[in-house]
Amino acid sequence: MRIAIKPHRLKGYVIRTMVTMLCVMNFTSLFCREILIITSYNPDTPKTFSHLTDFTEEIKRRFNGKVSVAIESMNCGNLSEANLWKSRMTHIIDAHKTKKPDMIILLGQEAWAAYLSQDSKLAKQTPCMAAMVSSYTIILPDYKCDFHKWKPKGIRYTEKKDFNIVGGIFYKYDIDKNINLVRDFYPQAKKIALITDFSFGGMILQSHVIEEMRDHKDIELQLLDGRENSIFEMCDKLRRLTSPNTIVWVGTWRIDSSENFVLANTTETLHSANKNIPAFSLSSAGLGSWTIGGYIPEYSPQGKKLADIASDYLSMKNKNFIIIPNEYSFDQKMLNKFKLYDKQLPKNSVIINTPSDFFSSHKTLVLWVLGILLILSIGLLFSIYYISKIKKLTRNLERQSKELKEAKDIAEEANNIKTSFIANMSHEIRTPLNAIVGFTDLITQDDSDDNDKKTFCHIIKENSDMLLELINQILDISCVESGKISISKEACNVTDICHTAVVSVEHARKTNGVEIIEDYPDEAVTARTDALRLKQVIINLLTNAYKFTEEGFIKLSISIDSKNNVIVFCVKDTGIGIPADKADDIFKRFVKLNQYVQGTGLGLSLSKIIVESLGGKIWLDTSYHDGACFMFTHPIETLSLDLTKTIKTPNSIFRKPSALHCLP
C-alpha cells in the first residue's frame, strides 16, 4: 500500500527534520570541543611532532576525550616564499568556516605572523593562542616584496588589540640585558656586529635588535645579514673586524643568502674566520663552541604547558600569557680563552665546558671499562660458582658411586646369604617335620606299646616346639625387614624377667650335665623396658648356649653400671666357644658357624636389633676363653616405684619360679 504525502506536509516534514538535526549538532557541540592547530612546518618533524603529541594527549586527558584536535600545516619553506604564507593561512581558515573551531593554536613564527596578518572576522574573533614564537613579530606585507632587502618594523603581540588573543607561550629576547652583559665584560666596547641568517626568525631578531639599539646611541650596530651575504662573504666580513672595541652578537644561523640550509659546523666556520674577537649569543646559537655566553631563553618542550592554558580557557575562560624565562649561560672554556675567569658572573648562571677531573672528562670510557670489569667479575663469579658446583656434583657422584658399589656388594652378599638360608631352611624345616610325620605314623600303628607311644609323643612335641621356634624367628626377621617391629616400654622387674626366661629354657631343653646359674644383685633390678622383647633376647642367648654346651654350666648374671647408668647382662657358657675373628660376623643374618647345628642363624641378629631398639648394645666378650660370653646393656630410667617384693638370693629363684612380673 502506498502512502501519499501532500506537498505542504512534505515541506513541513523536511523543515522539522533539519531543525532536529541542527539541535542535535548544537547539543553535541556543547560536549565536544574542537581545536584547530596550524603549524609552520610539517607536523612529522621531530620537534613539532613532540609538541603536538604532548598537547593532544594532555588536552584529551583533561576533557576525557571529548575534544577534537585538527592539525593543519603551512609547509613553510625559505623566506623568499613568505609572500605565499598569508594566502595559505587564509585558505586554511576558510576551510574551517563550516564548523567554527573553539580555539586556534599557532605553532611557529611563520604561522603566527601569517595569522596576525589576516583580515577575516573568523581569524580576529576566534580565540587564539601561540607557541614556539617570539613576543616580538612582523606583520607580513600585502604586496610582493624582496625579502633579501626588506627592513620591516616589528610589533609585540600585545599591540594586536583587534585579535582575540587569549594566551600563549612566548620567547622574549632581552636585548638590554645582553647589552649590559657586554658592557660588564668589555666596558670599552663601541661596536656590535650582529649575525643573522636568511630566515624569518633571523629577520624578526634583526628587526628587534635594531629597535632596541636606538636607545643605546653609544654603541654602533653593524649588521652581518645572511639575507644579503653567503657564508663565504660573511667569513670575509668577520675577518675585517679588527677593532679591539668590536663585539660579535650571534643571533641565528641556519640559511645564508643562497637559501640553502647549512649545517651546524658552519658556525665553527664563521668562528674560524676571526677567533680573536669575543662573541656573545642571543639565542644559544654558537654557545659551547664559539660564544662566551649570553642571556638566553630557556628553550623547553611546550606541548603539555600549552594544553594546560588551553584547557583553562576552554573550561573557565581564563587567559594566560606565559613568557619563557631567560637565563645566563657561559662557556668556561671561552671565559678562560679571553681571560675573563676573574669576572663576577650573575647569580644562578649556567656554566658549560667546565674543567673536569679524569672521570668526568673520560666518563664514557670509564663507564665502559667499569661495565666490562663488572661483566668479567660476574662471569668470574659464575665460573667459580659452576666450577664449585661441578666439583660438588663430582664428589656426590663419586660418593653415590661408592655407595652404589657398597649397596651392590651388600645386595650380592644378602642374596648369597638368603640363598644359603633357603638351603638351610629346607633342611631345618624338613628335619622336625620328618620327625613329626614319622613318629605320628608309628603312634597310629597297633604294635607299639604305651611306653613307646609316650616316647613318640615326647619326640613329636620337641620337634613341634623346634619347628615353632624356627617359624617365630622367620616371622620376627620379616617384621624387622618390613619395619613393623614395635617396642612398648613399661616399668618392669628385670630380675623376674631373667628368672622367667631361665625357667622357660630349662623347661624346653633338659640337658644332662649342664648346670644353669643365676647371679643377680641382692635388690631387685627395675627398668622401663619391653618385657617380651627383653625376655626374647635372654632366651635366644641361653638357647644358643645350650646348643654348644655339652657339659659344665651356663651362667646368666646382671650387674649395675652406675657410671654409664646401664644394666649389664652377661650369658657365659663352657661350650666350644667362638673365634675372636668371628665376633662381628655372628650378629649378621643367616650366619651359622656350625652348619651341622640346628638353627636359622637369625637368633643373634634379632637379639642385636632388639637390644639396640631398647637403647643398649650387644657384643661378644673375646677376653673370655672358657667358652662363649655374650654381653648386652640396657639403659636405666629413674623410677619412683615401691617394690614390695624383692629377690634376695639366686637360690630362691629355683625354689619359687614365677610368671613375668611387670610394674603397672
Image (cartoon, rainbow, N blue to C red):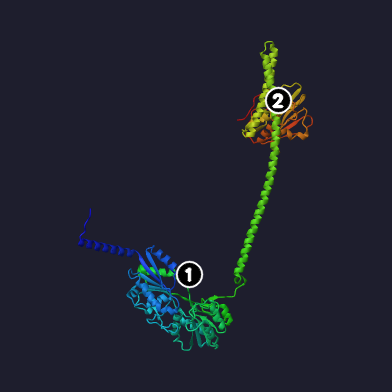
Quadrant in the picture for the C terminus: top right
Q: Residue under circle 2?
A: 427
Side (left or right) of 242 relative to 654: left
Instruction: Check if mark 1's residue and mark 2's residue have beta carbons within 8 Å.
Output: no
Pointer 1 local density, CA inside 10 Å: few below 14, some 14–19, many at least 20: few
Near-viewer residue (433 or 263): 263
Residue 329 position within the rendered picture, expressed as x and y whole percent measured from the top left? 52, 77
Q: Secondary structure at mark 1?
A: helix
Pointer 2 local density, CA inside 10 Å: few below 14, some 14–19, many at least 20: some
Residue 276 position within the rendered picture, expressed as x and y whole percent measured from the top left? 57, 84
Residue 48 position within the rendered picture, expressed as x and y whole percent measured from the top left? 45, 70
Residue 52 position within the rendered picture, expressed as x and y whole percent measured from the top left? 43, 68
Q: Residue under circle 1?
A: 46
Residue at left offset 65%, top offset 56%: 383
Q: Residue lying farthest front?
A: 1
Side (left or right) of 663 relative to 53: right
Q: Quadrant of residue 622?
A: top right
Q: In the rendered structure, which disc, 1 or 2, sits on the residue that comes first in sequence?
A: 1
Residue at left offset 55%, top offset 86%: 239
Residue 377 seen in the current view: yes
Q: Secondary structure at mark 2?
A: helix
Near-viewer residue (14 or 444): 14
| Amino acid type for the residue under numbered disc 2 | His
